[in-house]
Image (cartoon, rainbow, N blue to C red):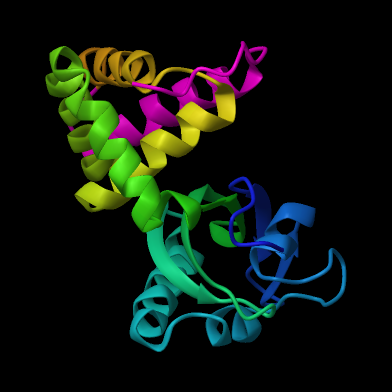
Amino acid sequence: MDEHSDPLAGRFTYDVASGTWDWDDEVFRIHGLAPGSITPTTDYMLQCKHPEDRSRVAAVLTRASGTGEVFSLSYRIHAADGVERRVVLVCEGGMCEDDVVTTISGYYIDLTNDFREEGEALASEAIAASAEHRATIEQAKGSLMLAYGLDADQAFAMLRWWSSKRNIKIRDLAERLVETARRGEVTDSGLRSGFDALLHDISEEPAAAAETAV
């Protein structure tokens, strides 16, 4: 897969007992693999991680496998096609049987393109050209940082990714996120619930004409 292609997103389900993952086609591609070419396991998933990120990812997965808690992780993948990718893994929670977590599920977002140097430069220029929207965008970034455990660059990359994916201006998406934050709980889990619902609703909306500028 070309590293300059459109960003990918895909869903996963993790079977805690067997340690195996069910990936959709896009998650295989994020990992530089042909869809269905392997049976993903936790060992394989961790092997793909950047060495500096591996122990952190393993610790969060171990905790979530026991509690079923929601989480978000940003890390680097050394993909099978030789490309290093920056991804966000979002777990929407687990399912239990007899108070034992059996599966956790969620989605991957490939933010590699949004971290490219030229992409960051264009983003900075777009924000500078729309100073009147800066405060709202910064509030939205801050809310994403709290809700998903991201840093400032990762939060803006995620904001740009959703803007591009659904053809919604960044400023309009930021306004919706800020409004959701104002209505919701002022905790990371409360924000996560509100944002997940909002982003799901946006995903179900028909895509308009391409308008990703701020």
Query: Which residue is depicted at the point 50% across and 48% down?
Result: 93
Residue 149 visible, this angle: no
Residue 50, percent from left and from top:
44, 82
Position above or below: 105 against 22: above
Q: Judge from the rendering whether residue 87 lies leftward or rightward of residue 186; answer left or right.
A: right
Residue 128, percent from left and from top:
18, 27
Query: Which residue is depicted at the point 69% across and 79% down?
Result: 41
Q: Quadrant of residue 27?
A: bottom right
Q: Judge from the rendering whether residue 129 lies leftward or rightward of residue 81; answer left or right.
A: left
Comparing 144 with 42, the one in front is 144
Residue 172 visible, this angle: yes
Query: Which residue is depicted at the point 16% across and 27% down?
Result: 139
Q: Quadrant of residue 102?
A: bottom right
Residue 30, percent from left and from top:
65, 62
Comparing 111 with 46, the one in front is 111
Q: Judge from the rendering whether residue 84 lies leftward or rightward of residue 1; answer left or right.
A: left
Position above or below: 34 against 114: below
The image quadrant where one finds the C terminus is: top left
Position above or below: 180 against 117: above
Residue 92, percent from left and from top:
51, 45
Q: What range is drawn magenta here?
A: 185-214
Query: Which residue is depicted at the point 43% across and 79% down?
Result: 58
